[in-house]
Amino acid sequence: MLDPFQKVMKLGKATVPAIGLYGCCSSEICLLGRDMAHAVPQVKRITGLDPILCSISGSSLLGIFAVLDGKNILLPQTVLPQEVVFLEQQGLTCHIIEAKETALGNLIAVGQGILASDELSAVVKKRVRQALDKPLRPGLIAGLPQVGQLAMPLAAPQGSSNSASSFGFVAATISDEELSYAESALGLRLFRVTVNRGVVHMRSGLLGNAHGLLIGSACTPIEVQQLYDASLEMTS
């Protein structure tokens, strides 16, 4: 286990490399795939939230299928009725997005605004924008459409005035022009990082909020340092 950040958030190493594929976390809610029940104590300690074990479309890969923003959640049309009922019972407002694309978590990043993949149709982007009631801009990151896996805005703890509310992480291969665009679209500052020994789809190896962050088990010391430096810079 890594030492906790004293100023912004705690860091902890997960037991699997792709921890971000198994959950999604906001400042108010943390969802974790049913297959990750063993990780509940660690996720609670790091994020400050009690993880809710669930499935989406019959899968524990929540980070691929869902987009969580506060207590709003975007779900693919393949979500099962009983899954929607369960999530609503947990206090979530569910928005089922009718689209041929089901991996919404791969294609949408949400901060103060929304960055949506160029691959989504205009109709789908409108549905997303209306569901979350935030401005939306289409785009790419590092020339790739999987913006939801290539950027990770951090949700600040509820009621926090900390500057951590306005930063996040992004693929290290993003161009300067794309970085400026993504920061404008999401309304926050982004820091270039990789995870799990150079993986650029960095959200796959990260789970958490501005209270704390679980990182993939294969992250190198240099990658951990990148995360630490970003948090330190935002509080200096």
Image: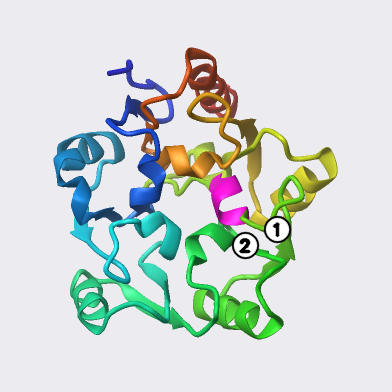
First-in-chain label (1 vs 2): 2
Query: Residue 90, percent across and down?
Result: 20, 69
Determine the main secondary structure of the stretch shown in magenta.
helix
Query: Residue 173, percent across and down?
Result: 72, 35
| Residue 206 shown left or right of residue 113 in the figure | left
For residue 118, above or below residue 187: below
* Amino acid type, label 1: Ala
- Tell whether label 2 touches label 1 (CB within 8 Å): yes
* Disc number placed over residue 116 in the picture, else none: none
Which residue lies under the disc numbered 1? Answer: 185
Q: Is residue 183 visible?
A: yes
Dividing the picture into quadrants, the one containing residue 73 is bottom left
Dividing the picture into quadrants, the one containing residue 7 is top left
Residue drawn at x 27%, y 18% as measured from the top left: 1
Query: Residue 17, percent across and down?
Result: 38, 33
* Amino acid type, label 2: Gly
Q: How many labels does the image show?
A: 2
In the foreground, 13 or 92: 13
